[in-house]
Amino acid sequence: MVQTKQNEMRAAKAVAVIYEDASIRERAVHFCERLVEAQHSPELNLDWWSFAVLSDPAMAHPAVEKAARADVVVFAMEARGDLPQPLKMWIEQWLNKRGEREGAIVGLLHRDEGWHGAASFREIYLRHAARRAGMDYLSHAAPTLRRAMPDSIDSFSERAGRMTSVLDGILQTRPYSQPAL
């Protein structure tokens, strides 16, 4: 009986959903519905907080504790711009309490129609936060964007293996030798 309860507790996943506004919240609802469908166990413990709620320290404190224990933290927001400072402070608080727990940060970033540029400040921040916490970072963006994320390991690896005209010129230049006096 105790073993069964422990298995049930492990099967239930804690998901914290942070959303920017009501219209983007709807996108997160659809994402969570698909997440429930994909789970072998449909039980997810979902907690929802808006940017506005997390900007109020008194209201944000319980969210810090829940996000620190969550298996998945979803950020549903616009891709453009930088994150508000109170939200960054909230993220840093729960990251510091997380410890060695595995998990994932999911970036559901809404981009304008036809966007094909580099990663936004928001996405870069979330990726770095996930890396510092030892969490996976997942996004709905295609892994083969036209431009790699600046200052990421992927970007450095891709540039290291590329032969540029500058590198080719350096390799083809003969060493300068001074004439004998």
Image (cartoon, rainbow, N blue to C red):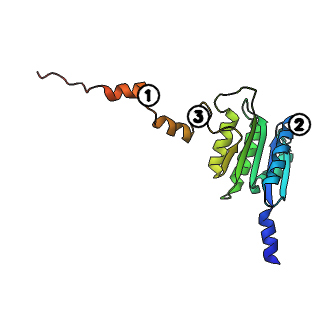
Residue 147: name its quadrant. Answer: top right
Could you tell me if residue 127 is visible in this image?
yes
Q: How far is the residue under mark 1 from the one under mark 2? A: 47 Å
Residue 176 in the image: state x and y as whole percent: 24, 24
Residue 16 in the image: state x and y as whole percent: 80, 50
Q: How far is the residue under mark 3 from the one under mark 1? A: 16 Å
- The residue at which mark 1 appears reads as 164
Q: Residue at x 76, y 55 (%)?
A: 70
Mark 1: which amino acid? Thr
Could you tell me if residue 61 is visible in this image?
no
- Whether tag 3 and tag 2 are in contact, CB under 8 A, the answer is no
Q: Left or right of 126: which side holds 66?
A: right
- The residue at which mark 2 appears reads as 22
- Whether tag 1 and tag 2 are in contact, CB under 8 A, the answer is no
- The residue at which mark 3 appears reads as 148
Q: Residue at x 87, y 40 (%)?
A: 26
10 Å crowding of disc 1: few (<14), some (14-19), many (20+): few
